Image (cartoon, rainbow, N blue to C red):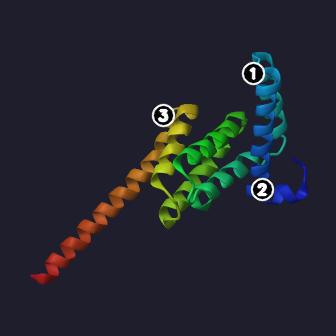
Amino acid sequence: MKDEALVKDPVEFTSKLLAFKNEIDDLVEKSFKNDIKFQKNRDVSFQNFMNKQDMTPHYIAAYCDNELRKGLKGVPEVEVNLRLDAIIRLFCCLHGRDIFIRSYTKHLASRLLNKTFLSKDAEELMLQKLRVECGHNTVNKLASMFNDITLSKTIMEEFKDHNIFAQIQ
C-alpha cells in the first residue's frame, strides 16, 4: 500500500491487490475450509488493509476502466465474468464506495462518448454486478447513460435521413 511505484500506477496497484485478495481467499478456502470465522476475519482485515490508501477507490475504478477499454479484448465470456467478479469483490471491501461510483461514472462517460469500450455486453454485465451491490437507484444513472447514447444515435440518424430527403426535393 505504500510502495511508491505501485501508488503511481493505478492498474498495477489494483492488479497486485486482486492477486493478493485471490491468494488470501484461496488460503482461507483450502487451509480453513471456508470456516465462517476465518472468512469474517479475512474480510475485516482486508478492508482495513486496502483502505489505508486514500486513492484505492479511484485506482479500482481506473483499473476497471482499463479492463473495459482494452484488458478484456479477446477474452472469453466466462473469463470476463470472472474478472468483473474479482473487481466487484474488491469493491465490496471499499469504505469509499461512493468515491468509486463517481470515478467509475466519469470513466464510463468517457468510454461511451469516445466509443472506446470493447463490449456493450461487458459494460452491461458490470452494471448488473454493481446494481446487486449498490442498489437500483445508484446504478440507474449509469444505465441511463447507455439509453442516452442510443437515443442520441437514433435522433442523429433520423436527422440525417430527414436532411437527405429534404435535399432531394
Q: Report, in whole angstroms, how far the alpha carbon at label 2 lies from the one at label 3.
A: 31 Å
Q: Residue placed at 45% from the left, 52% from the top? A: 145
Callout 2: few (<14), some (14-19), or many (20+) C-alpha neighbours within 10 Å? some
At x 70%, y 48%, the residue is 60
Q: Nearer the viewer, mark 2 or mark 3?
A: 2
Residue at (48% x, 65% y) in the render? 115
Proximity of marks 2 and 3: CB atoms separated by less than 8 Å: no
Which of the 4 quarters of the picture holds residue 24? Answer: top right
Q: Please name the residue that numbered disc 3 is placed on.
A: 136
From what the image shows, is residue 144 above or below residue 111?
A: above
The first of marks 2 and 3 along the sequence is 2
Residue picked out by circle 1: 34
Residue 51 in sight: no
Position in image of residue 96 (x %, y %): 71, 39
- Residue that extends furthest to the front in the rendered view of this protein: 30
Q: x and y percent of residue 30 in the render?
A: 79, 27
Visible residue check, residue 157: yes
Q: Earlier in the sequence, mark 2 or mark 1?
A: 2
List the residue tagged with mark 2.
12
Compared with residue 82, is residue 165 higher up or lower down, i.e. above or below?
A: below
- In percent of width and height, residue 118 lies at 52, 60
Helix, strand or loop under label 2: helix
Distance (Cα) linking label 3 and label 1: 30 Å
Numbered disc 3: secondary structure: helix
Identity, as a three-letter code, of the amino acid under mark 1: Asn
- Camera-nearest label, 3 or 1: 1
